[in-house]
Image (cartoon, helix red, strand yellow):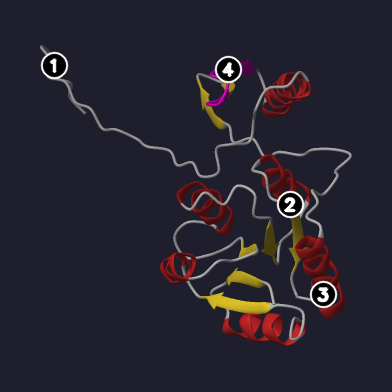
Amino acid sequence: MKTILYLDDSITSHRLMERFLQGVCEVKPARNASEALAILRAHTVDLLIADYLLPGESGLDFIVHAKKEFALEEIPSLLVSGSMDKILITLAVKHGINDCISKPLQKDVVISIVSKMLLEPYHRKVDSLAVNIICLEWTAAGRYYQYCPELMHLEEAGDYRSVSDQMRTYLEARFCAGADLGMVTNAVTTSHIVEKKLDNPLSA
């Protein structure tokens, strides 16, 4: 019987997956990346399945790293998520994930996809791609600005709608032309307080 690794911090999801796939394959459940890595060191698996949202690195990151570390590039993989949308599917496809499964887990869907993947691995076909591109925005001296770190591109306008439309038009053109965008998944702003001495002190 073939074996799958299922990485998910939900015990309920583990139990569902094991019940759904009873008689189909053996499920090796893992609650975190450390447990999953231990399973990969001790067992040969035929399919990697991981929930996207996990403490620490995402399930997508785990699959990518595990395939490189254990030379599992030929092993098929599935991404599971309760917030599966076109953006996440695009991200998964771009990283070589074979297919995606939405939560809550449905028995017929799980059995169908896992059975097909174990018998003859395939890659999901998508007719369009969608990415979430993080930009920074601010106002200064009555002007509106947006900056795309991935392309190091700045747009400026006299109002918020105009600068947003300009940036969106630019990003759509670059994305359709083949630019690899949407790789920034977490961004924060940092501010710095600086001080200088005045030759002529100011008074209130």
Q: Cα distance, mark 1 to mark 3?
A: 73 Å
Q: Is label 2 or label 4 in front?
A: 2
Q: Is mark 1 on a helix, strand or loop?
A: loop
Q: Which of marks 3 and 2 is nearer the N terminus?
A: 2
- Nearest to the observer: residue 71 or residue 66: 71
The image shows residue 181, relative to residue 48, as above or below, that is above
User: How much space separates mark 4 and mark 1, taking CA atoms?
Assistant: 35 Å
Per the image, the residue denoted by label 1 is: 198
Rendered image: mark on residue 153: 4
- Please say if the residues under marks 1 and 2 sit with CB atoms less than 8 Å apart: no
**Amino acid type of disc 2?**
Asn
> Taking 39 as reference, is 75 above or below it?
above
Q: Position of residue 69 (x, y in %)?
A: 45, 50
For this rendering, which residue is in front, 136 or 38?
38
Q: Is residue 110 above or below residue 123?
A: below
Q: Distance between the residues labelled 1 and 2?
A: 63 Å
Is 72 placed left or right of 86 in the picture?
left
Q: First in sequence, mark 2 or 4: give its number.
A: 2
Task: State the separation of the CA atoms marked 2 and 4.
Answer: 33 Å
Q: Give the number of the mark in front: 1 or 3.
A: 3
The structure residue drawn at horizontal position 74% and vertical position 86%, both measured from the top left corner, is 22
The N terminus - image quarter: bottom right
Q: What main secondary structure does the magenta stretch of the protein show? A: strand
In front: 5, or 129? 5
Q: Residue at x 56, y 77 (%)?
A: 29
Amino acid type, mark 4: His
Q: Read off the magenta span.
A: 147-157
